[in-house]
Image (spheres, helix red, strand yellow):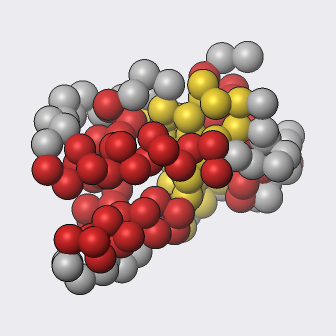
Amino acid sequence: MGKKDVAEKAAVAYFGLSSSMDRFPKGTKVNVYEGFGSNPKTTGFLDELAKKIESVWHENIGSYSRTARLSTHDFLYYINKLREERGATPLTLKSALIETWMKNITDLYDDVVLVEVGNGEKRKLLLVNTKITL
């Protein structure tokens, strides 16, 4: 199974969508991004975040998809743990930095993809580590 297939399966399971693409809620689109060309520098906070995310993949394996994945909420949890250690105020889900850092993590690791599930104006993101699949 290819990276895109693994990532789509993880997103379908995580967000509770039908496993059949033709049975998704009308207007739902799933996009899998293998990279964004951001060429991020792993210094400072991004370096700490990348190490943290590396260390928690095995704690975030889906029971159905059997693949390591992090939702925006999960990702924000780890961001805020690191920010707390630094004495910084926590971010909220509205912060644009969350998506930026999710894209950076996608660009840093060959096996990590970002899945976007959208329906109209609603949009959800999921980081998937396609290498960590049971």
Above-or-below relation of 5 to 104: above
Q: Is residue 111 visible?
A: yes
Who's the residue at 14% across and 36% down the image? 41
Above-or-below relation of 86 to 38: below
**Outermost residue to the front:** 85
Number of dots carrying numbers = 0
**Residue nearer the viewer, 55 or 100:** 55
Who's the residue at 32% across and 31% down the image? 108
Who's the residue at 70% across and 38% down the image? 67
**Residue nearer the viewer, 47 or 26:** 47
Residue 28 relative to residue 44: left or right: right
Q: Quadrant of the C terminus?
A: top right
Q: Residue 96, percent across and down?
A: 27, 65
Residue 22 relative to residue 30: left or right: right
Who's the residue at 29% across and 41% down the image? 104
Q: Which image quarter: residue 85?
A: bottom left
Q: Residue 88, percent across and down?
A: 20, 78
Q: Is residue 11 visible?
A: no
Q: Residue 59, percent across and down?
A: 64, 51
**Outermost residue to the bottom:** 89
Q: Residue 133, percent across and down?
A: 71, 30
Residue 18 relative to residue 39: left or right: right
Q: Quadrant of the N terminus?
A: top right
